[in-house]
Image (spheres, rainbow, N blue to C red):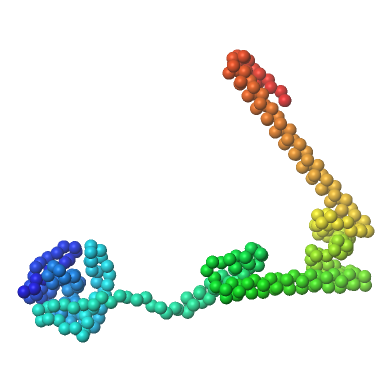
Amino acid sequence: MANWFVQRDGSEQGPFTFQKLKIRAATGTLRPDDLVRQDRGQSWVPALSVKGLFSGTEAIAETQPVRQSIKKDGRESKEFVARNPNQRAASTGTFIHDSVQEKPSQKWSDHQIVRRIKAIVWSSLTLAVATTCCFPIGLSLIWTHPTWSMLRKSFWTGIFFLCLTLLAVAHFRSVHWNKQEFLAADALWNSGNESAAIEKYRNISTTYFTDKEKETVYGRLIEWDADHGNDGSAIRLIWGMKSRKLSPRITSRRANELIAKFEAEERAKQDKAEEKGRLEREEYVRKKTKRETEAMIDDQLRQKRITPQEAKWMKDNLEY
């Protein structure tokens, strides 16, 4: 007769006959989630998986997997334990069970797909911009990548040259537009429509202009703002003119006064900065001399050439 053993909360009970197990199951002493095994050489299985042990539950046990906690080799693991309906159990209560592993779903939700597409787009843009801005290092990194295929390297090289071409086109279009605006503003100024010309001058970027063209733009804007009471704007333009070392021909009296005022203020700031630097250097020399003299007095005191009272008097009467 087969002996049965029961395990609950890590403790083992038994041996029991199959009939005693059925009585324990009927009275509730044996629960469906308790672990049982037939003889000591068998593996632990849930009591629910033993055919004929729980009346009215065989159909459920045969058709539905049950997730149980099973101890194997001293470790607790989760697995699905189910009856195989094609197998037959002995009338004595012999059990047969299969382990069914749970597989994660491979389907992606719409939200995950959108996030994946966004990640690919942003990573592509980041790599393209970084490669373009770091030329030629970025391009060399593409072709020395250890795992990329030739097709992928060619693809990113094409993206790089595309970005470079777009940047060049945008740059030349900007330069061309500024040149055209300058010519249109110059024509308006010469025709006497100075207000319309000033509006165009303000929107122009003079980065790639010649010095003569820059002096024309700055000179006319400074004169216009000075004559119309826009002293703040005129001062900012004068600062830009001086920082670019331009010397436009200024005929407006008010504009020349603002330029003279600006230059005087700049000279005053420069003189103040020089005076501050001179005072800081003098203070540094004074402190350095004081430290050196005190060190010399302390050295003489250690050599007992002077007394402590003489050393204190000498330190108190130091003059610099």
Position of 314 relative to 88 (above/below): above
Position of 262 relative to 179 (above/below): above
**In the picture provided, is 318 more to the left or to the right than 178?**
left
Which quadrant holds residue 73? bottom left
Residue closest to the eye, 96 or 114: 96
User: In x, y percent, where is residue 72?
Assistant: 23, 66
**In the picture provided, is 29 more to the left or to the right than 232?**
left
Residue closest to the eye, 251 or 281: 281
Which quadrant holds residue 154? bottom right
Residue closest to the eye, 165 or 242: 165
Q: Quadrant of the C terminus?
A: top right
User: In x, y percent, where is residue 132?
Assistant: 65, 67
Outermost residue, left side: 1
Outermost residue, bottom side: 86
Position of 84 relative to 235 (above/below): below
| Residue appearing at x 82%, y 58% in the figure | 237
Q: Can residue 123 be seen in this view?
A: yes
User: In x, y percent, where is residue 93?
Assistant: 12, 78
User: In x, y percent, where is residue 180?
Assistant: 83, 73
| Residue appearing at x 86%, y 73% in the figure | 184
**In the picture provided, is 103 more to the left or to the right than 44?**
right
